[in-house]
Image (cartoon, grey):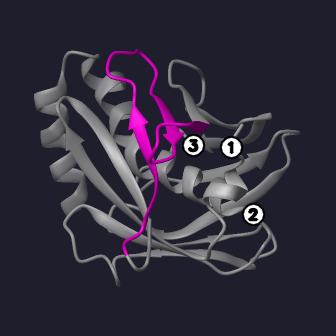
């Protein structure tokens, strides 16, 4: 089995969103453009499911969403099992509030900044900066950069945390407000929320 550390061992990554046929795919590269991995989204499913794979197609991780619960929750798995859980605060009038717990339920990270604009920091509960997310190096539309600043969390966990927050938040609102068939109107909501 391929380990996450064998695939994602650096400190600087670019996440680029691609539409391949009808499947949403995210390409993970290093700062020089070398392809490291892909994240692919399951096409038809009530709850979002994404998986990580190497360029040769070997799976090494997965994000499983649980949207129809009291609190939107996203579990992050590697080849050994559950490694972290992303949770979202449900009653927040402006913006989104997400945090990350380890597999034992202890909080290990939160964010500060603007998720929609790809300009935020992942930090520990004590306030130590773990990673920066920004568009500084990202020249392609719908792409953003992740800089890992400490070894508190593995690059894989940071990347999975960011992808869950950035992409699944929109699907949550489409399902909650419109149901699974309301894609077109949901896109309007996405566009509106990105401007406010």
Query: Is residue 34 in the magenta section?
Result: yes
State how far apart marks 1 and 3 are (Cα).
Answer: 30 Å
Decide if residue 8 is in sight here.
Answer: yes
The answer to which of marks 1 and 3 sits earlier in the sequence is 1
Q: Closer to the camera, 49 or 54?
A: 54
Image position of 122 (left or right of 32): right
What residue sits 23% from the left and 77% below the top?
A: 139
Residue range (magenta): 33-60
Image position of 99 (left or right of 140): right
- Tag 2 residue: 153
Disc 1 crowd, CA 10 A, few/some/many (<14, 14-19, 20+) = some
Q: Provide residue 34's location: percent of width, then percent of height.
A: 41, 69
State how far apart marks 3 and 2 are (Cα).
Answer: 19 Å
Decide if residue 118 is in sight here.
Answer: no
What residue sits 51% from the left and 46% below the top?
A: 54
Q: Quadrant of the C terminus?
A: bottom left
The answer to which of marks 2 and 1 sits earlier in the sequence is 1
What residue sits 66% from the left and 54% below the top?
A: 157
- Tag 3 residue: 88
State the count of labels: 3
Q: Provide residue 129's location: percent of width, then percent of height.
A: 68, 79
Q: Which mark is residue 176?
A: none
């Amino acid at each position: 089995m391929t380990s996450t550390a064998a695939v994602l061992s650096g400190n600087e990554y670019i996440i680029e969103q691609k539409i391949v046929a009808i499947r949403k795919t995210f390409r993970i590269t290093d700062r020089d453009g070398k392809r490291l991995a892909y994240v692919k989204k399951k096409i038809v499913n009530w709850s979002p499911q994404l998986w990580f794979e190497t360029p040769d197609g070997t799976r090494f991780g997965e994000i499983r969403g649980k949207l129809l619960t009291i609190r939107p929750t996203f579990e992050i798995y590697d080849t050994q099992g559950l490694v972290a859980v992303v949770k979202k605060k449900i009653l927040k009038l402006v913006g989104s509030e997400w945090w990350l717990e380890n597999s034992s339920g202890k909080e290990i990270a939160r964010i500060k900044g603007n998720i929609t604009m790809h300009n935020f920091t992942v930090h520990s509960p004590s306030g130590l900066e773990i990673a920066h997310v920004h568009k500084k190096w990202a020249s392609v539309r719908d792409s953003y950069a992740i800089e890992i600043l400490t070894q508190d969390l593995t690059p894989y966990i940071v990347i999975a945390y960011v992808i869950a927050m950035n992409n699944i938040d929109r699907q949550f609102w489409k399902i909650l407000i419109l149901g699974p068939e309301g894609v077109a109107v949901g896109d309007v909501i996405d566009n509106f929320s990105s401007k406010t």
